[in-house]
């Protein structure tokens, strides 16, 4: 009879099995059946939920779920009189399917699914949505909660992304030869986007957001199992994610207010994540390539390494920002560069350079936030206040707006 | 000790719409609840029921496909528990996670020879 065994279930078992089984069935039945496949997996999970509430979870829950979902899908295909094309030589395949899928096959299917969802034939945004929905097992509601979309909009976006998947992706296979780097670049970009969606300090659901970060890391680690995916970019990206994730718990105070990097309590940093960051950073260093992700990881390395904020080597950080700007110039990047420049060279010089950026950053609240910082340091308080008001007018994120309003309030005192 | 039957009704439609994560959470709550009943010796037995079924009526001549009632009232599972009294069995049922999804529990005393 039931015991407390269910408590021992691994975290996110259902969500991960959703992704794993969708990948397995899509590899066999093709991307064009994705909608029915998702239905079948959802139905299998629903059965499991009812059964396992009353009975012990079987030793291989994934195998059980896969077999039930497989059955459900075959049933539906059969009802639609299209089964001849998929069942092949009879029902044996249904019985055998569960044994045939060992852990190596499962991993391989997941990898193929990642590349399919991140096909360059579809947009980055759709790749992100598909990765979350089909691989991560996130529901539309969870996606909307994490990404601050309303549920209806998220539902429509996911439907459009799924339609792209059905028509544009084709075979679920690993890209070969010259296509590989192109796909890999897209995959890394999407993983990074997923991580950033989760990492953004906003008033989305914090728990789901943390799960998004975890999913990004899981995908990146999955990728790193494959020999030809082990590039400097991937290892750097993993390192970057681990460094940033190590600060997750220190970014908000107990009231949910934003804590600035310089005021963060470093004892709240997660050492395990930081150590993974160092490990993967060292691995990436062996390639000796100054890739974009490597440089970004290098900045995070400089941030995480010292005992205190005051010990951060800003000159080194500035050097890395210079390299980033040389190779990938952008207005936002220049602004980030200037924020470090100020720490090394002071507010007066920084303000002069900053004002040259105004035409390209006129609608960016970060431009005005930083301008406020500089003017305050120079005791030009009236101008600082005006800049702050512009920042508040432009900022969209509620947590950030609250923070800026707090600063404005302090001005009036 | 007398045995009591819990009939779980409803809540299914809403549960089928849940995300994988929510389903797992909900399942774990059932596990915790029933695990607690098992530890105290309250739990006797129980099983969930599939949605599919038939209704036989008209002297056994009429067979119709389920469902047998409006969606909200379909029996989704049952449990048999040991309790001192109907009141105490009713009290115990209040911890059931089915209430999260607007389901109901019908508590019935099982007849016994030793009266």
Image (tube, coloured by chain):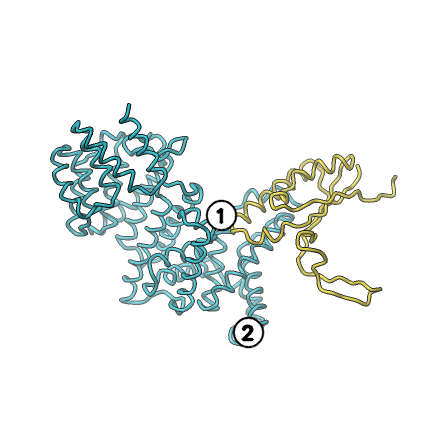
Chain colours: A cyan, B yellow
Residue A284 horizontal side relative to residue A41, left or right: left
Q: Position of residue A245 (x, y in %)?
A: 35, 41
- State the image quarter where residue A305 is shown: top left
Q: Classify the position of the C terminus of chain B by image quarter.
A: top right
Residue B77 horizontal side relative to residue A397, left or right: right
Q: Chain of mark 2?
A: A
Q: Classify the position of the N terminus of chain B by image quarter.
A: top right
Q: Is residue A139 above or below residue A251?
A: below
Residue at disc 2, secondary structure = loop
Picture residue at 57% right of the left edge, 58% below the top:
A43
Picture residue at 26% right of the left edge, 52% below the top:
A232
Label 2: which residue? A83
Q: Nearer the viewer, residue B106 or A28?
A: B106
Label 1: which residue? A12
Q: Chain of mark 1?
A: A
Picture residue at 63% right of the left edge, 40% below the top:
B33
Spatial separation of the CA atoms under disc 1 and disc 2: 33 Å
Q: Residues within 10 Å of mark 1 (few under 14, many from 20)?
A: some
* Between discs 1 and 2, the one toward the N terminus: 1
Q: Position of residue B38 (x, y in %)?
A: 68, 40
Picture residue at 49% right of the left edge, 62% below the top:
A101
Residue at disc 1, secondary structure = loop
Q: Nearer the viewer, residue A67 or B56?
A: B56
Q: Position of residue A284 (x, y in %)?
A: 26, 49
- State the image quarter where residue A397 is shown: top left
Q: Is residue B64 above or below residue A15?
A: below
Establish whether labels 1 and 2 are both on one chain: yes
Q: Residues within 10 Å of mark 2 (few under 14, many from 20)?
A: some
Q: Position of residue A143 (x, y in %)?
A: 43, 50
């Amino acid at each position: 009879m039931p015991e407390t065994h269910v408590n021992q279930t691994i975290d996110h078992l259902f969500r991960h099995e959703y992704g794993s089984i969708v990948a397995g069935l899509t590899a066999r039945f093709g991307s064009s059946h994705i909608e029915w496949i998702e239905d079948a997996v959802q139905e299998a999970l629903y059965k499991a939920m009812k059964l396992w509430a009353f009975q012990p979870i079987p030793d291989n829950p994934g195998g059980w779920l896969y077999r039930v979902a497989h059955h459900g899908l075959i049933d539906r295909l059969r009802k639609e009189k299209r089964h001849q094309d998929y069942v092949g030589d009879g029902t044996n395949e249904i019985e055998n399917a569960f044994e045939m899928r060992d852990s190596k096959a499962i991993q391989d299917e997941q990898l193929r699914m990642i590349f399919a969802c991140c096909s360059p034939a579809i947009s980055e945004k759709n790749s992100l949505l598909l990765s979350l929905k089909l691989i991560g097992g996130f529901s539309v509601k969870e996606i909307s909660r994490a990404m601050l979309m309303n549920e209806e909009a998220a539902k429509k976006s996911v439907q459009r992304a799924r339609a792209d998947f059905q028509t544009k992706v084709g075979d679920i296979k690993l890209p070969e030869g010259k296509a590989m780097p192109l796909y890999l670049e897209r995959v890394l970009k999407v993983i990074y986007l997923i991580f950033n969606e989760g990492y953004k300090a906003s008033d989305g659901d914090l728990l789901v957001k943390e799960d998004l970060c975890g999913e990004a890391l899981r995908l990146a680690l999955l990728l790193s199992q494959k020999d030809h995916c082990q590039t400097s970019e991937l290892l750097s990206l993993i390192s970057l994610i681990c460094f940033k994730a190590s600060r997750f718990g220190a970014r908000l105070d107990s009231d949910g207010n934003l804590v600035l990097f310089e005021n963060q309590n470093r004892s709240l940093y997660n050492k395990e994540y930081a150590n993974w960051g160092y490990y993967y950073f060292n691995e990436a260093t062996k390639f000796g390539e100054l890739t974009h992700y490597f440089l970004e990881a290098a900045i995070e390395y400089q941030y995480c390494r010292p005992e205190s904020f005051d010990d951060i080597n800003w000159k080194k950080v500035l050097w890395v920002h210079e390299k980033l700007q040389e190779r990938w110039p952008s207005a936002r990047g220049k602004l980030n560069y200037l924020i470090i420049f100020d720490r090394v060279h002071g507010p007066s010089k920084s303000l002069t350079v900053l004002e040259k950026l105004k035409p390209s950053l006129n609608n960016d609240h970060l431009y005005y936030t930083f301008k406020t910082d500089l003017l305050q340091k120079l005791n030009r308080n009236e101008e600082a206040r005006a800049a702050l008001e512009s920042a508040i007018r432009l900022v969209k994120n509620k947590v950030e707006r609250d923070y800026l309003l707090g600063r404005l309030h302090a001005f009036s005192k | 000790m007398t045995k009591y039957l819990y009939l779980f009704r409803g809540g299914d439609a809403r549960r089928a719409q849940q995300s994988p994560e929510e389903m797992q959470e909900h399942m774990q709550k059932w596990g915790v609840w029933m695990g607690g009943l098992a530890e105290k010796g309250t739990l006797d037995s129980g099983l969930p029921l599939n949605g599919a079924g038939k209704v036989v009526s008209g002297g056994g001549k009429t067979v119709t496909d389920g469902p047998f009632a409006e969606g909200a009232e379909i029996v989704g599972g049952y449990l048999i528990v040991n309790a001192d009294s109907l009141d105490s069995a009713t009290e115990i049922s209040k911890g059931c996670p089915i209430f999260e999804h607007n389901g109901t529990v019908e508590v019935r005393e099982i007849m016994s020879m030793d009266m």
